[in-house]
Every structure is written in C-alpha cells, then in structure tokens.
Image (spheres, helix red, strand yellow):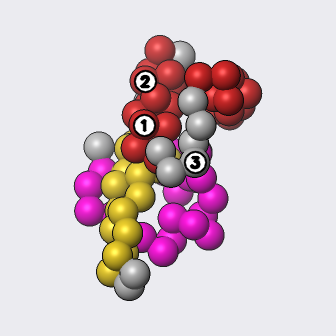
Amino acid sequence: MLRAAVAAYTHLRPFVLTAHDQCLHDSLTLIRFLAKQGVFARWVIGVRTRPFGAHSWVQSGNTVLNDVHENVRAYTPIMVV
C-alpha cells in the first residue's frame, strides 16, 4: 500500500507543485497525501554545517520516500515527526 501511494503521489506531483528547492512543502504535501490513504510515515528535518543547509524529507523506517539516500545522508536529522 505504501509503495502504491508514493507512486501515485509522485505521478500527480508535477501537476500541483515543483519539488525543486521546495522540500518542506513537498514533504508536508506527501505526509498529508499518505495520511488520506491511511498510510503514516515520518517527516524529517535535517541540517548540515559545511556548507550550512537544511533539508526536509519523508521516510518510512529506513526508506526515504521523496528523495534519495545519497542526498539525505549529508544531513543530520534534528526533528522527526
């Protein structure tokens, strides 16, 4: 169910918003979309120091749902909801 819901969201996302440089909005939209499907995942906010940056993504267990592991591993999670 999780895989199908994320695939549906990924398919519909370009019609509603662009994910480029809008990770917070994209992540919150995905969390809400999944919740309406009865699927609950975790919203993560992470930071890095050099160079400073902040990023947001959604994951279920160790699986990142709206990004790739190679990108998010550069960030240290500071909040998980």
The answer to whether 74 is drawn above or below residue 78 in the figure is below
Left or right of 11, for residue 61? left
Callout 2, which amino acid? Arg
Looking at marks 2 and 1 on the same chain, the residue that comes earlier in the sequence is marked by 1
Q: Which quarter of the figure is the N terminus placed in?
A: top right
Callout 1, which amino acid? His
Identify the disc placed on residue 32.
Answer: 2
- Number of marks drawn: 3
Give the label, 2 or 1, closer to the camera.
Answer: 1
Q: Position of residue 41 (x, y in %)?
A: 45, 37
Residue 56 versus residue 1: which sits nearer the camera? 56
Circle 2 sits in a helix, a strand or a loop, which is it?
Answer: helix
Residue 49 seen in this snapshot = yes
Residue sitting at x 48%, y 74%: 74
Left or right of 9, for residue 77? left
Residue 2 seen in this snapshot = no
The answer to whether 64 is drawn above or below residue 27 in the figure is below
Residue located beneath label 3 in the image: 20
Identify the disc placed on residue 25.
Answer: 1
Residue sitting at x 38%, y 84%: 50
The CA span between labels 1 and 3 is 10 Å
Q: Position of residue 37 (x, y in %)?
A: 53, 16
